Image: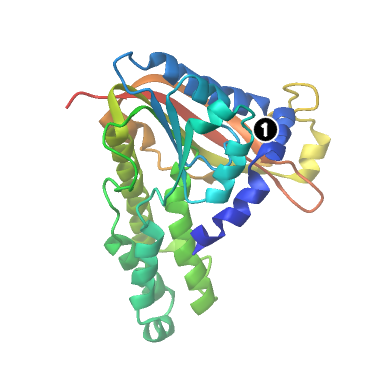
Amino acid sequence: MRIDTLTYNNVQSQGAQRRAWLRQRSPLHLEHCSALMLHAIQQRQESASRSVLVLGAGACTEVPLSDLARASDEVVLADLDLAAMQQGCEELISPVLRKRVRLLQSDISGSVSLNLNRLIERQRWATIVPQGAQAVFDAAARCLEQCSIPDSPQLPGLGTGEFGVVISSLVLSQLFSYPLLDILDHVQRIAPDCFGEQERHRCYQEAAQDFRVRVIRAHLHLLRELVDVGGVVVLLSDVRGFVFDSHEASKRAPLRCAEGSYGTDHDAEHRRPMPVMPRTLPELVRDSFKVIEETRWEWLTDLPEKGRLGRGYEVAGYVLIPTVV
């Protein structure tokens, strides 16, 4: 399962070195993430819990951990990657602040990847594959439709209404993309001739989109469940990706945001979009929350190099309060 590679991937993409890279090349990304989280602290009512929860914390690359710890009685970091959280916590110099941080290793999706993998293993692929691509992707669609998605996930160690601020830190898209990649990885192994044809199969595409929406709803319900009365939620999520051509990027200098930094001023002609999030995300958010603040920005994760495309994402950042039921 892709989720099993999370620790290795995070070593490559998180931590102090990555933060330094972002400060040089996408400083606005770090500024927006920090500003929204600290704004939530300011918006938290005095009567609300002074505990903060960060879901998908990883190594706290975009999380201003020291500032959150100073403004809170406790900061709980929750992620499947325990080593990354430990790495992030070790950056705190003050022993007092370190004592305020609690680490919780948890699959915050509610074991969706595991549930899907069990369904994949139950399929009779030996009889399905010879029937062709339609049968393969129909079977894949059934796995997605039948996959159990806890709504909302029950995470041991986290209590209902326990936190004055709940932060979902750039993890939402991973919750559905990892299991969807798992099923495509399986198709590639058992039916390599069918791999890459999923876009042609409407039944699979509809099942995949419904799967994404169910995962998103479950996560939003989790955020709502964990925040205290008078508390505030921060949702940061990639909503769209893009790659850009290294040859053209070398001819057209990218926007300089700061000394040595890069923006994403690559015109549409030389950018290829990659859908990440269903377009209904804003409506799904407003089904459960009142939007206090909404910001969108782009950031780069990889610069173009010889033989490799550059990559970046558009992020939606929300500060939210639960709507009254």
Residue type, numbered disc 1: Asp
Residue 193 vs 228, above or below: the answer is below
Q: Is residue 191 visible?
A: no
Q: Secondary structure at mark 1?
A: loop
**Residue at coordinates 80% horizontally, 27% vertically from top-left?**
260
Q: Residue 310 at what x, y percent from top left?
A: 70, 44
How many discs mark residues in the rendered view? 1
Q: Alpha-carbon neighbours of circle 1 within 10 Å: few (<14), some, or many (≥20)?
A: few
Q: Is residue 252 visible?
A: yes
- Side of 207 where 200 appears, left or right: right
Q: Residue 217 at what x, y percent from top left?
A: 31, 42
Q: Nearer the viewer, residue 130 or 226?
A: 226
| Picture quadrant where residue 131 is located | bottom left
- Residue at the disc numbered 1: 267
Q: Nearer the viewer, residue 13 or 315?
A: 13
**Residue at coordinates 51% horizontally, 20% vertically from top-left?**
70
Q: Nearer the viewer, residue 227 or 274?
A: 227
- Side of 172 where 225 appears, left or right: left
Quadrant occupied by the C terminus? top left
Q: How is the image coloured?
A: rainbow
- Side of 108 where 306 appears, left or right: right
Q: Residue 223 at what x, y percent from top left?
A: 33, 35
Q: Nearer the viewer, residue 190 or 79?
A: 79
